[in-house]
Image (cartoon, rainbow, N blue to C red):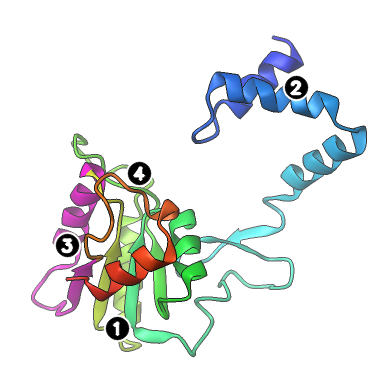
Amino acid sequence: MSSLDRLTELFGKLPGIGPRQARRFVFYLLATPEGFRRELADAITGLRSDTRRCSLCFRFHSAIDRNTDICNTCSNESRDSSQLMIVAKDVDFENVERSGLYKGYYFVLGGTVPILSSETPRYVREKDLIKTVDGRKKMGLTEIILALPANPDGDNTEKFVKNLLTSEENKLKISALGRGLSTGSELEYVDSDTIRNALANRG
């Protein structure tokens, strides 16, 4: 396989990128100066060395200025320790945080539990979630907010998390974002006004 075809194949594995768009990326790179291609390659190579996964919320964060596995959000003691928002992906965290409307802490689940799945996918951080909730309870946690996609897999994941965390000893309020989110929508694409309404109408 040629480098052109191999790079097209790799770009095609990115979320939302089809074969034709992947090919356009390759032709664009071929037309750019060598310096840009080298800079892009260096940035990709350095991505993992400059980035860490937070040991508390499990999102990726820049570690250039932080010699720690805990991200700046989880280490911020001024945030509301009574709330923990569970999101499916890192991009969901970023969209909610960018809105500036939520002041509690987060947990990145790793994805959703497909409605047709017979067992919990390995990427779903089931044990880590239980451990995080237990730790946050000692710090004043009283409410868990489920901020999951408004689609069948998101609904199934919501049921999964509720079953996982609901027990006699675990007397926490578990709420979900209000359906200001249109059916089928992904949290990463939702605007700030919709997030505000969904938070206000959670239940």
The disc labelled 3 sits on which kind of residue? Lys
Confirm whether the magenta stretch covers residue 123: no
Q: Earlier in the sequence, mark 4 or mark 1?
A: 4
The crowding category of the residue bearing disc 3, from other C-alpha atoms within 10 Å (few below 14, some 14 to 19, many at least 20), is: some
The amino acid at mark 4 is Arg
Q: Is residue 79 above or below residue 184?
A: below
Rendered-image quadrant of the N terminus: top right
Q: Identify the residue at horizontal 49%, vertical 88% (top origin).
A: 77
- Label 3 vs label 1: CA separation? 16 Å
Q: In this picture, is 44 found above or below 1? A: below
At x 16% / y 77%, what residue is drawn? 170
State which tag comes first along the sequence, 2 or 1.
Answer: 2
- How packed mark 1 is, by other alpha carbons closer than 10 Å (few <14, some 14-19, many 20 or more), is many
Query: Which amino acid does the dot numbered 2 rest on?
Result: Phe
* Residue identifier under label 4: 122
Q: Residues within 10 Å of mark 4 (few under 14, many from 20)?
A: few
How far from the left and from the top, in percent, is residue 153? 24, 43
Q: On residue 27, which mark appears?
A: 2
Q: Position of residue 78 (x, y in %)?
A: 49, 90
Q: Residue at x 70, y 50 (%)?
A: 47
User: Is residue 50 or residue 144 the one in the foreground?
Assistant: 144
Q: Earlier in the sequence, mark 2 or mark 4?
A: 2
Q: Is residue 111 visible?
A: yes
For disc 2, the neighbor class at 10 Å (few under 14, some 14 to 19, many from 20) is few
* Front residue of 37 and 129: 37
Question: Residue tagged by mark 1?
Answer: 141
| CA separation in Å, label 3 and label 2 | 48 Å
Pair 2/1: label in front: 2
Cα separation between marks 2 and 1: 51 Å
Which percent across, then down, holds residue 82?
A: 31, 85
